[in-house]
Amino acid sequence: MEEKMMKTTEKYSLEDILKKIFLGIAVVFLILSAWGVYSALNDVIRLWIGYKLAPVYKALLNLAVLILAIYIINLLVKGRDGERDSRNDSNESSKSDQS
């Protein structure tokens, strides 16, 4: 019975595959645009802030980007753990129902 469940979960429809491809493309565009914004902000800091204070503002910008990245990674990891937990709970409940 478990083998049958594993085989059905391994099959992907064309729609699922296309969604994953487009999601990957969107993530690449997101990374490229985020890098562009980051570079532009560094240029703005270099132009508008005096040369003595520019390293301080760049350090603050880098710190903000670091905190944001850690927060997003934390959300993604918790989201995946939650999905696994809910899948395990549903699998365990379906096994107990079959018994």
Image (cartoon, rainbow, N blue to C red):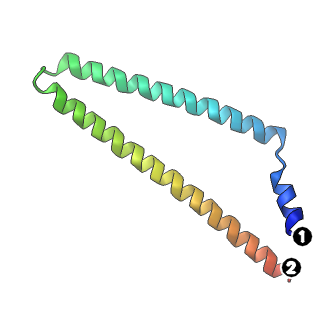
Residue that appears at 75% across and 70% down: 91
Classify mark 2: helix, strand or loop. Answer: helix
Task: Measure the C-alpha gap from mark 2 to mark 1.
Answer: 10 Å
Residue that appears at 18% across and 28% down: 55
**86 sits to left or right of 4:** left
Asked where in the image residue 19 lies, by quadrant, the reply is top right
Mark 1 closeness class: few <14, some 14–19, many ≥20 residues within 10 Å: few
**4 sits to left or right of 53:** right
Spot occupied by residue 86 in the image (x, y as percentages of width and height): 66, 66
Residue that appears at 73% across and 70% down: 90
Q: Residue furthest left?
A: 52
Classify mark 1: helix, strand or loop. Answer: loop
Which residue carries the number 1 mark? Answer: 1
In this view, 40 is above or below 23: above
Amino acid beneath label 2? Gln
Q: Residue furthest front?
A: 3
State how many labels appear. Answer: 2
Nearer the N terminus, badge 2 or badge 1? 1
Mark 2 closeness class: few <14, some 14–19, many ≥20 residues within 10 Å: few
Residue that appears at 85% across and 68% down: 2
Task: Determine whether label 2 and label 1 are within 8 Å by CB.
Answer: yes
Mark closer to the observer (2, 1)? 1
Asked where in the image residue 92 lies, by quadrant, the reply is bottom right
Spot occupied by residue 77 in the image (x, y as percentages of width and height): 52, 55
**15 sits to left or right of 36:** right
Spot occupied by residue 25 in the image (x, y as percentages of width and height): 63, 29
In this view, 49 is above or below 88: above
Mark sitting on residue 98: 2
Q: Where's the C terminus, which quadrant?
A: bottom right
